[in-house]
Amino acid sequence: MKRILIASAFLFTAVFGLLSCANAGDKAAKGIAKTISVDAYEALLKQTPDAQIVDVRTAGEVAGGIIPGAINIDYSRDDFQTKIEALDKKRPVFIYCLSGGRSEHALEDMQAMGFSTVYNLEGGMLAWRNANKAQVMPGDAAPKKGMSMSDFNAAIKGAGKEYVIIDFNATWCGPCKKLKPILEAIEQKNAAKIKLIAIDVDENSDLANAKQVSSIPYVEIYHNGEMVWSNIGLTDEATIMAHIK
């Protein structure tokens, strides 16, 4: 009887050990793929001399400034996977976009491709700029100055309307495209008292940074020059009009 118990115990231990090793192997195979804060991202970059930094924005966005050492592989292009596959999968990769959405999808894709270590920048380039982190111009590209803060304040006060709606957006932003006709309809229906000002964050990166715009679409409503409401994300006409008397 003792021999049977001992043999059973040995068999259980062996099987459990094999399963444990298999689970550990699975975890190891998955590697590291996660989204981290601006400070953690910067700190890891400094600690990783062989880091591969990838900006997955469009060429137009990249022209406004990139993280030092980054290369551009546009997530929206058909050759994205081919170019990403050309990277060294064993070396750490640091990815980012403008606000974190596209690079989050890229993170998932790269994890499926077998990259061992991938870090995504939470909040993207908007968060990086808002934190006053280092950025450089790619090649000889000239910075896009866009609207200054003084221009912005003048636009609000000099609109000649009781209410001014500010729409921070980008051409590639899906929710921005859905919000645009809603805002335009509001302005058209209330032309006597509402002025809509659309601001592309890519073309006005300095202003977006000064305003600490961290996500889009971002809407502000001003009444006689004073901000009365702001909102991040897609919203509807009723919600907006609730703040306009």
Image (cartoon, rainbow, N blue to C red):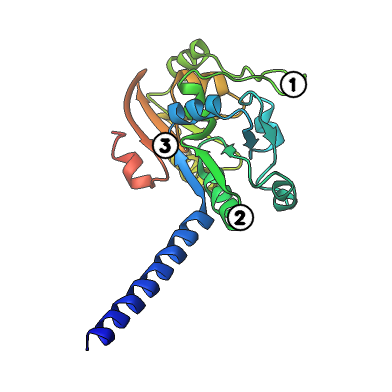
Q: Secondary structure at mark 1?
A: loop
Q: Earlier in the sequence, mark 1 or mark 3?
A: 1
Viewer-nearest of labels 1 and 3? 1
Residue 213 visible? The answer is: no
Q: Secondary structure at mark 2?
A: loop
Quadrant of the frame with the N terminus: bottom left
Q: Nearer the viewer, residue 187 or 215?
A: 215
The residue that appears at 70% across and 41% down in the rendered structure is: 73
Q: Nearer the viewer, residue 24 or 175?
A: 24
Vertical placement of residue 218 versus 137, above or below: below
Amino acid under label 2?
Gly
Amino acid under label 1?
Ala
Residue 140: name its quadrant.
top right
Count neighbours of disc 1 (C-alpha within 10 A) and say few if under 14, some if 14 to 19, many if 20 or more.
Answer: few
Q: What residue does disc 3 label?
A: 190
The residue that appears at 47% across and 28% down in the rendered structure is: 127
Vertical placement of residue 3 versus 27, above or below: below
Query: How far from the left and from the top, in percent, is residue 94?
Result: 58, 37
Query: How far from the left and from the top, in percent, is residue 213?
Result: 45, 28
Indicate which disc residue 141 carries.
Answer: 1
Q: Left or right? Give the position of 14 relative to 33.
A: left
Q: Are marks 2 and 1 in contact (CB under 8 Å)?
A: no
Indicate which disc residue 70 carries.
Answer: none
Q: What residue does disc 2 label?
A: 114
How far, Cα to Cα, is label 3 from label 2?
54 Å
Count neighbours of disc 2 (C-alpha within 10 A) and say few if under 14, some if 14 to 19, many if 20 or more.
Answer: some
Q: Earlier in the sequence, mark 2 or mark 1?
A: 2
Q: Nearer the viewer, residue 112 or 155?
A: 112
Amino acid under label 3?
Asn
